[in-house]
Structure formats: structure tokens, C-alpha cells
Amino acid sequence: MIYRRGRIYWFEFWHDGRRIRESTGLTNKRAATQAEAIRLAGLAQGRAGIVRKARPPKIEEYVKIFLDWSARHHRPKTRSLHKLNCQTLLRFFRGKYLDQITTADLEHFKAKRIREEHHSFQDGTTISPATVNRALATLRLMYNHAAGQGFEVPNPIRGLRFLKESDGQMRVISFEEEAAYLGAASQPLKDIAATILDTGLRPDECFRLEIGNLDFTQRTVFNSFGKTRAAKRKVSMTDRVFQILKRRAMIAKDRYVFWSRWKTDQPIGSVKTAHQAAIRRAGIQEYFRLYDLRHTFATRAVTAGVDLPTLAALLGHTNITMTTRYVHPAESQKREAVAKLERLRMGWLAQESGKESPQKYPQ
């Protein structure tokens, strides 16, 4: 069947149980009809262009192939993320062949997914733009992998605009919130949170701390986990962290400081449930992520006078530009900064008023 969209003719027909719908790129109906006939002939002769490519499978079939490949090439956290994203994608696209998912379908996915409530919260919080974008990134990687495997699949992600993400979720907790949170936290979350607050370690880095990388004589922690050279670093222990790690090293079941409840020879994988419960019990109204404790460390360090190059080394950053994104001055710090400027101005005015011939106030 030949039909027109705008000025361009398209054709649509069924072949081998599949619906083929493509643009001819032509504005002349007779030429478009000939293009359709050529396409049909090519398919009938076992060709699609010069070389016939493999017939694309349904998405639920290819997800298994993709996740098997991911298991061999990605780190555990990345594999888990892809698995979770694939579960979400299957809710929307199960039953569709890879070449049937269109950009319009993905626009519908974005619009509907962003309105879904977050299952981990009970306060009506909806899915964040970043979560939607991560699922789309997994789908894009899946299509790239399928194309590399010889499947003829136009990538619907190409040209799709991802949702705008905001840094608004990053926040710094106050000392009052810290006290309430740690007082309400269960173990090992309480020790993990205090360690992140005092060292600036990433949650994953904290989870994977090994007894052999603790130096209680020099009071340092060596993080051997990370993708960059800067991530593999030594950080100093505060008195609080020293006491925590010393105690946990004495009761450790194996080589990890924070071991899994189910497999003591493996590091703990997540404390999300305990973290959310601690926030509720502490009565903290504005939610924060465990990762925000790292932002809190960075902001407090700058407030205490730590220079950015040193802070970058402590955080495991390769450049200072990244470090500046981790520093979030609190409202009290902003007020104090303005107060300092005001005191400077008032000092100048007092100095000028003491002169015999006061100069004109600078414009």
C-alpha cells in the first residue's frame, strides 16, 4: 500500500509475518510504487539492500542477550542498573520487535514515566528526570549492541532529547540533622554514614573498604577501588572514624569492613531501606541521599578553610572543576558572606568619617 505523509510517499506491507513500513523519500507516486516493488523483490530474494541482515527479535528476547553481554563486560553496579532499567523498559515495550519501537513511543515513555510515583517513597514523590534518562541510556546501548550483532534496527534514540536534569537534589545536611539521623540509624548504616561524613568517600568506596587497607598506626584509609588513578587514594581518619573502623576490624567476619548480611565474604551492597527508615524516624522533612553526605563533607571542608586542590585529592577527583560541583554553601554561609561585606563597608565608612575632609562615598 502506498500512502502520502505531507509531500513524501510511504509504503506499508506484510512480509514473513512482519509489517514493513518505510519512507520512499520520493514525492512522485509512480516512482514510489516502483520503490515499493524493488523493496518487495529484494525481500523475496532474501536480500535487504546488498546483504540481508538478521531479523530483529522482540525486546524481551533481546534483553536476555543484552544482559548476558553486560554481565561479561560491566561492573556489578552497572549490571544491576541495566537489569533494573530493562525491567522498566519491558513494562512499556514488551511484545514489540526492536524495529517497531519508534521515537514517538519513547516520547510517550518519557511523559508517562516521569509522572509515576517512586515506589520507595510513600509521600507521592515521582520518578526523577535522571532515572528516566538512565533507562533511555540503557536502551540506546542495547540498540547499539543489536546493530553490532548484525540486526537491521534503526535506533529510535537518535535525535531524542533527554529530560533536563537538575542539581537541586544535591544538598548539605546540617549538624543538627546529622545528629538526629545518626541517632535514628541502625547498624551498619550508622557507621557507614559517619565514615562518609568524615572522609568524603563515595558510598561504593565505603562499602568495599577492606581490613588490609586500614593503617591504624598512620591513621589512614587506602581506597583501592575506582576507575581513575585519582580515585585510588589515601584519606586520613578522624577520631570518630578511627574508633569505628578499629571496632569493626576486630569483629570482621572476613576481609571487608562492612560485610554483607547474607555473604560475609562479600561487601555490603546497599543500605537504602535502612537510610530511608532513619530519615523517617529522625523526623527530617527534606529528603537527602546517602551520597549527599559526601557533598556535606566537601562543603564543610571548604568552610573549614581546605583549599580546592587538597579537597580534590581527598574526594578522588581528577580536576578541580568537578570538585566545585560538590561544594554547596548553606544559607547560613551565604548570610555570613554578605555580613562580612557589610562589615567591610561599615569599616570603610568609619575610617572616612574620622578624617577631616571625608572623601565622597565611592559609586
Image: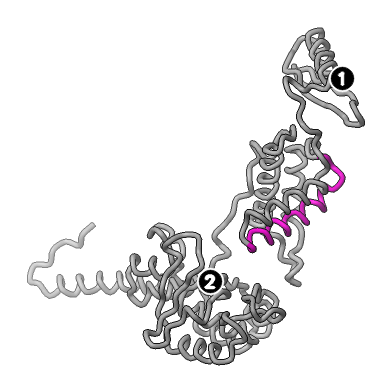
Instruction: Between residue 117 and residue 293, name the one nearer to us.
Output: 293
- Label located before the other in sequence (1 or 2): 1
Quadrant holding the N terminus: top right
Instruction: Between residue 130 and residue 268, name the one nearer to us.
Output: 268
- Residue 302 placement, left or right of 65: left
Q: Which residues are magenta?
A: 76-97
x and y, in percent, of residue 316 in the image = 43, 66
Q: Residue at x 38, y 88 (%)?
A: 217
Q: Is residue 224 magenta?
A: no
Q: Which mark is residue 44?
A: 1
- Residue 16 placement, left or right of 347: right
Mark 1 and mark 2: Cα distance apart in space: 57 Å
Q: Is residue 91 magenta?
A: yes
Name the element at disc 2. helix
- Residue 263 placement, left or right of 297: right
- Reading the image, the residue beneath label 2 is 205
Name the element at disc 1. helix
Few, some or many residues within 10 Å of mark 2 (<14, 14–19, 20+): some
